[in-house]
Image (cartoon, rainbow, N blue to C red):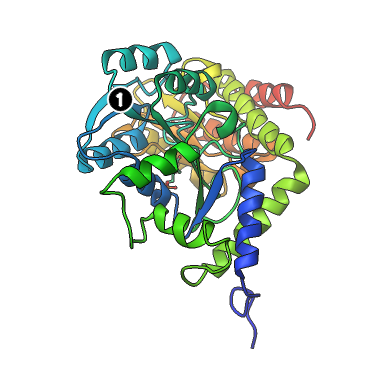
Amino acid sequence: MTHPLLDLPAVTAEDFARIERRVAALLGTAQDVVLMQGEALLPLEACIRAGAPRGSSALNIVTGPYGQTFGNWLRDCGAQVTDLVVPFHTAVTADRVAEALAAQPETGFVSLVHAEAATGNTNPVAEIGEVVRAHGALFYLDAVASIGAEPVLPDAWGVDMCIIGAQKAMGGPAGVSAVSVSARAWERFAANPHAPRGSYLSLLDWKDRWIDGGRKALMFAPAQLEMLALDACLERIEEEGVDGVTGRHAAAAAATRAGANALGAGVEPFVYEAKDAAPVATTLRVTDGLDAREVVARALALNPSVPLIAGGGALAKEMIRVNHYGRDASRHVVLASLAALGGALTALGRPVDNASARQAVTETWPGE
Ligand SMILES: *Cc1c(COP(=O)(O)O)cnc(C)c1O
C-alpha cells in the first residue's frame, strides 16, 4: 500500500540544484546557496566553526537567547569574543555596533540575529551591514525568524553568511535549512586550518565536492521528505508573492500589538517601540502580578488552536509569545488569539476591554 509520507518521488541532484536556485531567488542573492540537511542550527554552527579561527576576534551581538548560543560556539572555537548585549525589549543600533568595532579594531567576525521569535524584536540589518562592511569583518546573520516575515537581502546588506530555516514564516519544514555564502566568506573558511572538513558540519565539503564539482553528484542521500516539503513551501511563497507573505506577517504583528494595547489591562507589548517589533511573532509582557504561564494555560483552555506560548527560560513568568507566523499570519488567528487572551484575563479578574481589542485588530488589519 502506498502512503503519502512514504513512496515519494526521488530527489535528484538536479532537483537539489533547482531548489538551491529557488532559495537564492527568495534571498535575491547571487552568492552560493548551500542547502543543509538538518534544522537551522546546523548551518548556524557550521558557519561559526568555519568563519571564526582560533585566536581571532569576534563581536557577538546579543538581542535574545540565540545570540547567547552563538557566543558559546565562538568561544568554543577559540575566538576572543566581545558580547554586545542589548536589552531584549529593544533592538541594537548601527551606532552601537560601530562603537564596539572601534573599540576592538581587530574584529574579524560579527554575528547578529535578524529577528528573534523568542523575544519579538528585529534589528536594522541594512544599517549594521554598512558598518560591518566598512570595517572588513565577516557578517553572519541568523535570518531564521525573519525570512518570509520581512525582507531579507544578503547581497544588498553585505551579509557574508545568511542562514535561513523554513519552519517559521515560510510555513515549511524544520528539518532542512540553507545558507548563502559570499566569496569572501569562502576564502576565509578555506584559510582557517580548523574549519570542519570531512564532517556533517563542513561547508567546505559542499564547496569542494558539490559546488565546484558542478552540482552533479550529491555527497549523501538527500533528505527526501524535507526537500520536497521545502520545494513545495517555496512554490507556495512564489504563488502568493514574497511581498504578499511579508505583508501578511507585518499586518499580523501590527494588529496583535494594537489589539493587545486595546485590551487595556493585564498585558502590554514586550518590545517598547513598534519599529523594533518583529513581524514574525509578537511578545507581550504580563502586568499586575500575573504569571504568563497561567494566562497562557487559561487561554489555551478556551481555544487550544491559538498560537500562544509562555516565554522560554527566564522569561517564562513574564512573557507571552503570539506566534502568528506561517499560516497563522492571518486576521482570523490574530482575532482568535486576542479573544482567548482577553477571555483568560477576564477569568483572572482583570478589567480588559475585549470589544476594543477586537475593533483595534479589524481597524489595523481591515478585510482579508
Ligand atoms: C526559531 C529560530 C531558530 C531555529 O531554532 P528552533 O528553536 O530549532 O526552531 C534559530 N534562530 C532564530 C532566531 C529563531 O527564531
Q: Position of residue 334 (x, y in %)?
A: 63, 35
Res 156 visible = yes
Q: Nearer the viewer, residue 97 or 217?
A: 217
Q: Nearer the viewer, residue 145 or 312?
A: 145
What is the quadrant of the C terminus in the image?
top right
Residue type (three-letter) at the residue carrying disc 1: Thr
Mark 1 Cα shell of 10 Å, populated few (<14), some (14-19), many (≥20): many
Q: Position of residue 183 (x, y in %)?
A: 49, 40
Q: Which residue is mark 1?
A: 107
Label 1 SS = strand
Residue 283's place in the image compared with 145, above or below, is: above
What is the quadrant of the N terminus in the image?
bottom right
Ligand 1 positioned in quadrant? top left
Q: Nearer the viewer, residue 6 or 16?
A: 16
Residue at 69% of width from left, 34% of height from top? 248
Residue at 46% of width from left, 70% of height from top? 220
Q: Position of residue 239 (x, y in %)?
A: 77, 48
